[in-house]
Image: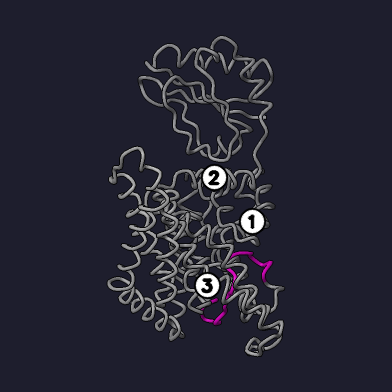
Amino acid sequence: MKLVAVTSCPTGIAHTYMAAEALENAAKKKGISIKVETQGSVGVENELTVQDIQEAHAVIIAAGANVSKERFAGKAILEVAVAEAIKDGEAVIERAMKLEKKDLIKQVEEIKQQRSEERTGPYKHLMTGVSFMLPLVVAGGLAIALSFVFGIEAFKESGTLAAALMQIGGASAFGLMVPVLAGYIAYSIADRPGLAPGFIGGMIASQIGAGFLGGIVAGFIAGYTADFLKKNIKLPKTFEGLKPILILPLLSSLFVGLLMIYVIGTPVKGILDAVTSWLQGLSGTNAMLLGGILGAMMAFDMGGPINKAAYTFAVGLLGSNVFEPQAAVMAAGMTPPLGLALATILFKNKFTKAEVEAGKAAWVLGISFITEGAIPFAAADPFRVIPSIMAGSAVAGAMSMAFRCTLRAPHGGIFVLPIPNAVGNPAGYVLAIVAGTIVTALLVGMLKKKLNEGIDA
């Protein structure tokens, strides 16, 4: 077992080095290997390398000053006071030894939770709306796909199971998609007072054909309007109860509704129609270029804002019956963890034992369309891993678009493949994913250094 530690006291003089010495002596008594980085008044000494951190079972931070923990992502961390390390170094070492080593899936869950908590401003509000909308898109898209089992136009015959499935998916689930998106964007901004104007604005956007773009615009207008009115309308205490039930819903809904009908709705509809028409007419090189760009965006920050921008763009287009970008986006989102998992098999001498073990879990995350499964690998060696996964995802996205693959569900990974008509051209889709995975793995293998050559080289 190997441990690493960082010691730092507010003044950076005596206690920093006393804590380091205490931890080193305690580890030596227990036969444990430890490397201690000191952050004293003279700067960082005995600095921990990427390989030191990767090989460590756990990290001890004995500090009275702020110590950045970003480079320890995925590692079990024990934080103690400097005085505690000096006074009883053996107890600190024992506690660190008992910490559970995080597996890749647990690391990814924590990364996703942390990113969710860090979202702020318009990005947070948009992602709140998207997260509430997604179940409707999944259920609606798959219900529509199942209706096609009986024939592409079987739903037109009233009273049939195909017609019922189309009513569930198309008329109901997809009908609610834009209002729910707008409603929960507004809810994220203004809390409950934002719901009514958000839903109403979203429904108007849906009715006039402004689609998801109109829903996004309506949601933000509704939220900020309701929030402004909530903060600025002052009533006597005896009438305060009327504000959330009568005044805020009425005024904010009228403002958003009239704005959508007479001012904003028509231009936004024109923009959406133009984008939809352009996408439907894409073919050949242009289609591959779009797929490549969306694919690279999916891999760039692996679940971050750029990834989510590409994903939201594709999901929104499902309501406009444009299914190719969603296929490209999901294929591209699957290949980073899959490619890295393959690389840990083909190039074992370029990964630590912990990374090779994590590669097994990366297979599961990849086929489940959890792009964040690549983050721990990228964090350890970003300048080699990130370009590799972007290239692989760009290949997957471009090939998916070139093969005219379609996808009616915004999530599910390979598990949507057995569902009839959920994926258009499934053979081409699988080929795109495999190609992207292989490109990622080969590039990682070419760019990464062998462990004995040093990861920082």
**From the viewer's perspective, is 434 left or right of 278?**
right
What's the residue type where badge 3 is placed? Gly
Residues drawn in magenta: 400-416
Q: For label 3, count other residues whose C-alpha is less than 10 Å away and answer few (under 14), some (14-19) or many (20+).
A: many
Observer-nearest of 349 and 240 = 240
Q: Position of residue 152 (x, y in %)?
A: 64, 88
Q: Earlier in the sequence, mark 2 or mark 3?
A: 2
Q: Based on the picture, tell me whether residue 408 belongs to the magenta stretch.
A: yes
Q: Is residue 414 left or right of residue 222?
A: right
Labels 2, 3: front one: 3
Question: Which tag, 1 or 3, sits closer to the chain's start?
Answer: 3
Q: Name the element at disc 3.
A: helix
Question: What amino acid does circle 1 point to?
Answer: Leu
Residue 379 in percent (x, y) is at 50, 46
Residue shown at the point (67%, 70%) measured from the top left: 416
User: Mark 2, residues whose alpha carbon is within 10 Å: few (<14), some, or many (≥20)?
Assistant: few
Q: Is residue 130 magenta?
A: no
Comparing labels 1 and 3, the label whose residue is closer to the camera: 3
Question: Tag on residue 365?
Answer: 1
Check disc 2 and give the amino acid type: Gln
In the image, residue 169 sits, relative to residue 39, either above or below, namely below
The image's mark for residue 12 is none
Mark 2 in CB contact with mark 3 (< 8 angstroms): no
Q: Which residue is mark 3?
A: 175
| Residue wearing tag 2 | 113
Task: Look at 66% across and 83% down and name the residue there.
Answer: 163
Distance, label 1 to label 3, CA atoms, is: 31 Å
Percent across and percent down for residue 156 are 62, 89
Q: Is residue 152 above or below residue 65?
A: below
